[in-house]
Amino acid sequence: MRRIGAEILVIGGGATGAGIALDAALRGFKTLLVEKGDLAHGTTGRYHGLLHSGGRYAVRDPQAARECIAENRILRRIMPGAIEDTGGFFLLLPEDDPAYADRWVMACAEADIPVEEIALAAALAEEPMLTPEAVRVFRTPDAACDSFDALHALARGIHAAGGIVRARHRVESLIVEGSHVRGAQVYDERTGESVEIRAEMVVNAAGPWAGQIAAMAGIALPVALSKGTLLAYAHRLTQAVLSRCAMPDDGDALVPVGTVSVIGTTSVPVEDLGRALSSEQPPSGLRPPPPCKGEAGWGFRHTTVQTRNTLDGLDSVEIEPWEVEKLKRRAEALVPAARDARLLRAWAGVRPLFQDESPAEGGRALTRTHTVVDHATRDGIGRFISVVGGKFTTYRLMAEDTVDLVGQKLGVYRACRTADERLPGNEPGRYHIFNKRYECIDRAPSAESVLCECELVTREQLAEAIRAGSVMALDDLRRDLRLGMGPCQGAFCAFRAAGVLREAQALTPEAANAALLDFLQERWKGLRPIATGSTARQAMLNIRLYRDLLGLDRLPCDTEPSP
Ligand SMILES: Cc1cc2nc3c(=O)[nH]c(=O)nc-3n(C[C@H](O)[C@H](O)[C@H](O)COP(=O)(O)OP(=O)(O)OC[C@H]3O[C@@H](n4cnc5c(N)ncnc54)[C@H](O)[C@@H]3O)c2cc1C
């Protein structure tokens, strides 16, 4: 067994864990981050993509609103390369409470959120697709943020500050000695090796899995899970974020993310994800669900299916037909043309909500949006801290609060630097430009080297990402480069990318087949809940290509693709 020592061990490679690892490393702590999957594999990689202005929370939760706008300004400074400065419009629609708008304007002013009311005609000149029925329109500093780019930048920042990031390292148990957590036993998924990590302080930033990690120290952490479903349209409906000027509700924001527009979310309590898993087996191979007689379209039906990640049961959630219908209606209220737009994909993420009945006695309810739990005071287990809740937009603040507590516990007082240190690869004021990806065509040695035409990913970019990262699956390349995320959902790029992966990693044909099948299965899961009309036609094309033409589900496959 390999043994490693660190001052701070952070569990979880989402925005929160990566933010904590960066903050700790910048304060001079010897820091190690472990993530069981790929970075951003959890909620962070499934979020809505909205860098909140705080407008959404201004009336209901002024504290959250103030945090969002303050962090929005900071993230624009430290990671502009991950942010597309789309701006936002809050729309008051005829069915919304007209009195809310004035209350909202006042609440935004109190939270320091800049809001400008503009004439509908001016808004329509900028965004011709938004509903002409809007009664009032307000401009806000909302934006889109690519969580994969953000996590890459954070990982580079951690390395630059002397910290270590280990993806594919799953914490299997915590080392508890007496009344202290002393580290963790970790399984390296790439090598199959067990690793013992000893640390001065262990930070649990495992998002929806935080309760599972706490349980490894015998602690009951009351984390309620809430599922949020999102739908992507196959192209951008607007260039700016659109939000409802109303109390927060399901499907009240439409966010332009890369090549698509995303409507979301729902908010549904999730009780027993394990049971959801066993109630319906994930579809095997690429077989479509049985045709549903009497239904229009291609025989697909809206059905409750699973979006299941291969890593473990808690990664699985169901998307309900009512969620799809409700989100579509909500998108159409903001952009009537959404009615005729093609849906590309559905997916869901899970929010962890801390529900301690007596936070004052143990958990430090720092704000209503996130909680840093000192398990020494709450549970009598020292050197162990959990952080739960929050938003992507406020990950940096959560990290600052957490590392402040770490320093206090270790008796080491060093100032937080993350609000001022720009992340590597970012230049002041240089926001991500949506159509910059076209440059990849100019740089490509030949037209044939563009492997993913939807997202403009070249063979050279793929090869570089495989060389640089800890790629174990084609889905890792999706997170790195947006491979297969565009309108064809992998129809034309997946087999090419599998070829590049096979070459670069000298995979056996069986392992390459398995990698391809896994990737297509992931894409399929997102198509299936919405597979009617033109989405079904795309799904059928993919099935025809891979199942009927290439016979992929009959080819020999390694069940576990080798690294
Ligand atoms: C549907 C939805 C939409 C959202 N939209 C927005 C939005 O638009 N804007 C916004 O600001 N916020 C949004 N949020 C909130 C935001 O996504 C999260 O606050 C943010 O991503 C923080 O994630 P995290 O790092 O805490 O958790 P995660 O991203 O889930 O990270 C936890 C990590 O821990 C890892 N892990 C778990 N167990 C282990 C183990 N045993 N060993 C090693 N690693 C382990 C997991 O693999 C995972 O990667 C949304 C949330 C949801 C659910």
Image (spheres, rainbow, N blue to C red):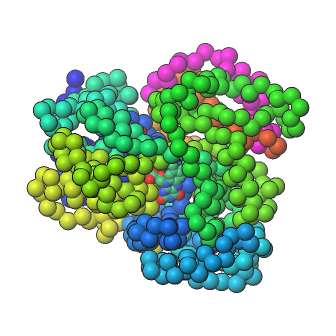
Does the image show residue 150? no
Does 180 sit above or below residue 514?
A: below
- The region drawn magenta spans 535-563
Give the left or right position of residue 337, taking residue 527 as reference: right
Q: Is residue 477 left or right of residue 529?
A: left
Which residue is at a point 75% across and 82% down the rendered structure image? Answer: 121
Residue 274, image x and y in percent?
A: 50, 28
Image coordinates of residue 343 in percent, x first then y, are 73, 49
Q: Quadrant of residue 530?
A: top right
In this view, 283 is above or below 377: above
* Magenta stretch, main secondary structure class: helix
Q: Where residue 444 sits in the image (x, y, percent)? A: 60, 51
Residue at image position (33%, 41%) is 221
**Residue 545 within the magenta-colored segment of the rendering:** yes
Quadrant, the C terminus: top left
Q: Describe residue 411's horizontal placement relative to residue 391 as left or right.
A: left
The residue depicted at 52 percent of the width and 40 percent of the height is 270
Q: Which picture quadrant has residue 425?
A: bottom left
